[in-house]
Amino acid sequence: MEVSSSADVADLLGRTGYLAGAELATVTYLAFAMQRPLLLEGEPGTGKTALAEALAEALDLPLVRLQCYEGIDATQALYDWDFPRQILHLRALEATGGGSADGTVEEAEKSLYDERFLLARPVLAALQQSPAVLLVDEVDRADDEFEAFLLEVLSTWQVSIPELGTVKAATPPTVVLTSNRTRELHDALKRRCLYHWIEHPGLERELQIVRTRAPEVSQTLARQVVGVVQDLRTRDLTKPPGVAETLDWARALHHLGTSELDLESAATTLGALVKYREDSDRVKQALDQLLRT
């Protein structure tokens, strides 16, 4: 699907229920047009991962997700060999005499590293399936060596497999990297990307998101929920609620038959909104004040 402007991006994302502001739509369009990775940073729950998912849906492209974590290495991102199938293949050769003669041993060994035994991990899969959307989620959890590996792949759009050769993407995938900023990423990786910091949405935009993503929730309840969440983000919470939690809370209240927020329904559904005991206690105190005003 052709994308020729930031307005096109905003429109396509909007059809999936993702409401992007002008700045985010513009940087996303530029990343697409310039074939540059898009690095999104921001607090958890601000819609970083959801943007990649919405892009894949809007452009009708496969979404390939690489979830980063402490200790991840290039092998876990690139490929591995299907060892059990290789063993079965070797036994089949032995049973049929295919690997018994001296002249066939080398051929038998080569056959173990046929492409059919290759297990493509996310980065290699994205290059093979391209055009695709490659989501590198929570890249800040990985270490320096993995960052260097990513930088090389994002610069060349190819990987080398010693047994098979080089795999190069015919069309570079659309790459979205997300970071919760648990540590600073290196400048070299940042220079390779277009950067955008995603803030929590303002009241009207978040209300629009709730109405779009959860149309079953009454307008009165949606506005009350968003108003409370907006206030809670200004308070000293261990983890302020993100947009995902706003949607979960609104839906939870709706499932209980609530059309207007009250103290009892709000207190009994806090598990959808906050995930720490200390936050729950603080929110209960705040709710009592907020709902009485």
Image (cartoon, rainbow, N blue to C red):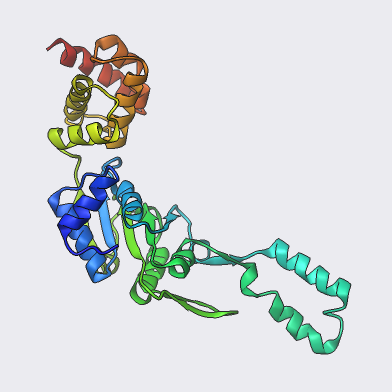
Picture quadrant where residue 226 is located: top left
Q: Up-down: is 286 above or below 81?
A: above
Q: Up-down: is 117 above or below 225?
A: below
91 with respect to 85 (left or right): right
Q: Position of residue 122 (x, y in %)?
A: 47, 61
Residue 261 in view (yes/no)? yes
Picture quadrant where residue 155 is located: bottom left
Q: Position of residue 137 (x, y in %)?
A: 38, 53
Farthest residue toward the front? 1
Nearest the eye: 67 or 93: 93
Q: Position of residue 29 (x, y in %)?
A: 21, 61
Picture quadrant where residue 60 is located: bottom left
- Point 27% across, 42% down: residue: 17
Residue 42 in view (yes/no)? no
Looking at the figure, which quarter contains the C terminus? top left
- Point 25% across, 35% down: residue: 212
Q: Position of residue 18 (x, y in %)?
A: 26, 44
Nearest the eye: 82 or 247: 247
153 with respect to 230 (left or right): right
- Point 35% across, 55% down: residue: 56
